[in-house]
Image (spheres, rainbow, N blue to C red):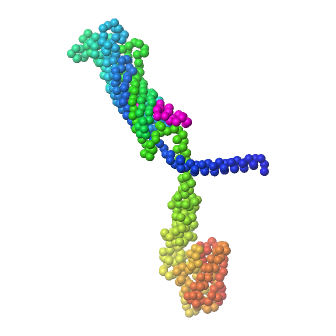
Amino acid sequence: MNTTTKIMNSLKSLLLVVAVLGYTTSQAQSDYFSKLRPAQKWSLGAQISPTFGHFDAPHENLSFSGGLHLKYSASQVLGFKASANMGKMAGSKDGTDLFWSASRNESKSSYEYTNNFIDADVSAVLTAGNWSFLRPLRKLQTFVSFGVGIISSDVEGEVTDANDASSYALSFPGQMNYFDVNGNSTTDFAQTVRATNSYSGTDITFPLGLGVKYNLNERFDLGLEWKTRLTRSDDLDAHDFELFNSSSERNRAWDSYSTLGLQLSYKFGDKDRDDHYDWLNPVETLYTEMDSINKSLKNLMADTDGDGVGDYFDKDNETPEGVKTYGDGTAVDTDGDGVPDSKDKEVFSLVTDVDADGVAKDDDGDGIPNALDAEPNSAAGAMVDSKGKAFEIKESSSYNCDNVTLPTIMFDNGSSKISPASYGVLYTLAEKLRMCPSLSITATGYTRSKSGERLAWKRANSIIDHLEANYGIERSRVSTDYAADTDSDYASRRIDFSQSGN
């Protein structure tokens, strides 16, 4: 044995040992793994948030918004959260910052706005507390989020100081709506005492969030999230930046706003589990995946009906006990007539037109199946040949014993029992032997093997017994013979008679 052969044999042995150990280990741990099921993945909650607008008007008044959120945790680290809020943002502009009249005696709140809004967004959430495989999970986690959303704004703004309104009308006549002391619209800046502006529209937002979450219990989490939403709009305060300040840090072409949301979330999903993906260590997920693989292997190896074919490959996993099956788990049907051998009373039918018991249909009862019967409507008791054709033997006083026509007897597959359909034929044969006392005949059976030769011998002897018992025909007048099977129909089921002496 050369070195290469030794190495190959060693590798085969090693692989066999690994396979056996792997299977044994998986079986030993199956009880543990079977306790692991996918954890809950959903959470639904509400939030209330102080809301701050970062607009051209730099002074934000404390405002609030509130709404709902729905989160799906795809893993311990990655989730997707949909949020919606309704609320308002309010702010003002200190009049002393007006770039054209810093020395004038103007109001400290020359411009005020209120934005009643509804927003919604979808964000990806990355939970930082579940990165480690080794560190045990804590009650507190941090997370970040980013996504895309929309905001629908309804903004009303107003310059409430008469001097400021007059200055706006003088410097920016087309930017706002101006009113006189009677509340009428005016274009005369000298008569202007109030200026207003408004905006209604929907804009795209780009939310960025940072938050912490605390695991209160199996059902609830408490969280705090700062989320800033950038927009591609300069209208969320209903005024153009150039009216307020020439300072570059306040000239915002893109408005933004922030919320500090206090969130309470209810965890749900698999009703049989109390734990949630957000609070599982990644190692537990590995065990769950291993459990899934183990269950798949068990299903692959399971054999519900005990027929030796695994359920995964078994096309009929309800095969009765003891029934032989093919490789796909279906019951053996030797003659292909649609009736399994376990229920087939004629296992070797040569036709597929059979009844519920697998017996070839023979409407006229002549022993020849309908599918092969040349005369399917033969009269009852008529003598027929192997094709099912009826024939008649006429008797006369001058019976010709030198040229006698002898019939053929048909048997069922594998049987040596004479069927009732052949009784009339044997009666005719007995009459011929009676009318020709010197007539001797030979019963020839057809065979393909030694076992077939024995069956042919049994069939011939059952005929001889019948003739002797019922008609008194001496056994010595009937001899037996065997011949090789031919291509003729029913060759292996026939017993032919021929004249052997007179």
The residue lying at 66 percent from left, 49 percent from top is: 17
Residue 479 image position (x, y, % from top left): 65, 84
Magenta region, residue range: 119-143
Q: State yes or no: residue 338 in magenta.
A: no
The residue lying at 48 percent from left, 37 percent from top is: 279
Report the front residue among 237 and 289. 289
Residue 137 image position (x, y, % from top left): 50, 35
Residue 498, relative to residue 84: is it above or below? below
Q: State yes or no: residue 121 in magenta.
A: yes
Does the image show residue 416? yes
Residue at the bottom extreme of this rendering: 397
Residue at the top extreme of this rendering: 103
Relative to 153, 320 lies left or right = right
Relative to 28, 93 lies left or right = left
Count of picture labels: 0
Residue 150 image position (x, y, % from top left): 39, 29
Does the image show residue 84? no
